[in-house]
């Protein structure tokens, strides 16, 4: 009877405890979000205040450097226009990221197994990396026209090298004991690649993807300077020609927000895919 009474008295408390646990978890997540957002927001606010103070004290003309308020009014006053042009640039960057990233990962999967092939491929990849995009973009416009293709190719060029290097390092960063175990089990090369090398390379691939995503946006925007009907690059180029600095800064602001959003989405995907990795475990501390 006493055991039954104890069970009846303690059973209703379980949902209450679960509610307390869920609420405390939400509070902890909110506190973590505020603590992570506070430093960049503080730097951003201080930068805007310094910018505004500099413009006012030096009495700089709007066609040289506009005030933050003028940029904000121009941006919010025609937000649909700026993000419509931004989506054009985003599509070009996404196409280049898929193309350049796909080629880089496929090539890295082969190069990771062959040092001689690596010595043959890396000089070409480095040459592609150090070639100025501004010099190549006009050539691509002449060869492939004024459509979307040359912008995608330029974005692919700038994303190729970071993903190639990260993928090569990742495919080689396997646990030696795990590799010996796979060989002891007579696993095929395909099984070793998918079950061991790909999971080991995921942290490197996703880190390289975050770097390459922002580079793809910049590459697509620069490619639009050589000839485009739409896109943020065209907006910035025309604003520069007309000395319309608020529009120019608003275009840059649009590109920045797109880059931040894209990086945040990729970081969320990274956290979801790499929940098992030591860097994302609860209580992990940076080294």
Image (tube, rainbow, N blue to C red):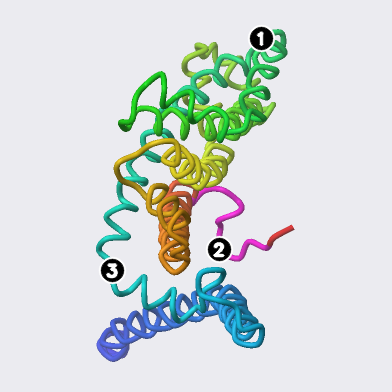
Residue corresponding to mark 1: 117
> For the N terminus, which image quadrant?
bottom left
Residue corresponding to mark 2: 282
> For the C terminus, which image quadrant?
bottom right
What secondary structure is found at the residue carrying circle 2? loop
In terms of secondary structure, what is the magenta stretch mainly?
loop
Residue 267 locus on image (x, y percent):
48, 54
Could you say which quadrant of the image residue 82 lies in?
bottom left
What secondary structure is found at the residue carrying circle 3? loop
Residue 55 locus on image (x, y percent):
60, 81
| Mark found first going from the N terminus, 3 or 2 | 3
Residue corresponding to mark 3: 78
Q: Is residue 138 above or below residue 8?
A: above
Task: Please give the range of residues in magenta.
Answer: 275-285
Which residue, as the protein is rendered here, is positioned at the far top? 116
Q: In the picture provided, is 115 more to the left or to the right than 3?
A: right
């Amino acid at each position: 009877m006493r055991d039954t009474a104890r069970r009846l008295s303690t059973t209703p408390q379980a949902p209450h405890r679960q509610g307390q646990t869920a609420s405390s978890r939400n509070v902890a997540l909110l506190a973590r979000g505020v603590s992570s957002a506070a430093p960049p927001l503080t730097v951003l606010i201080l930068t805007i205040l310094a910018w505004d103070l500099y413009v006012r004290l030096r009495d700089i003309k709007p066609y040289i450097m506009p005030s933050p308020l003028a940029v904000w009014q121009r941006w919010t006053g025609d937000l649909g226009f700026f993000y419509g042009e931004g989506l054009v640039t985003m599509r070009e960057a996404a196409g280049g990221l898929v193309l350049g990233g796909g080629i880089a990962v496929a090539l890295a999967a082969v190069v990771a197994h062959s040092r001689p092939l690596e010595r043959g491929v890396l000089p070409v990849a480095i040459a592609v990396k150090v070639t100025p995009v501004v010099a190549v973009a006009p050539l691509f416009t002449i060869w492939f026209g004024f459509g979307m293709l040359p912008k995608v190719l330029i974005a692919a060029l700038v994303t190729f090298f970071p993903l190639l290097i990260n993928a090569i390092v990742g495919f080689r960063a396997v646990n030696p004991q795990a590799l010996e175990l796979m060989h002891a089990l007579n696993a095929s090369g395909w099984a070793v690649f998918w079950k061991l090398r790909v999971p080991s390379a995921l942290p490197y691939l996703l880190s390289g993807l975050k770097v390459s995503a922002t580079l793809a946006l910049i590459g697509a925007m620069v490619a639009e300077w050589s000839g485009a009907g739409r896109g943020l690059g065209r907006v910035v180029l025309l604003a520069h020609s007309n000395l319309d600095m608020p529009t120019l800064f608003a275009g840059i602001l649009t590109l920045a927000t797109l880059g931040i959003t894209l990086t945040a989405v990729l970081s969320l995907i990274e956290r979801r895919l790499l929940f098992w990795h030591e860097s994302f475990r609860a209580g992990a501390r940076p080294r």
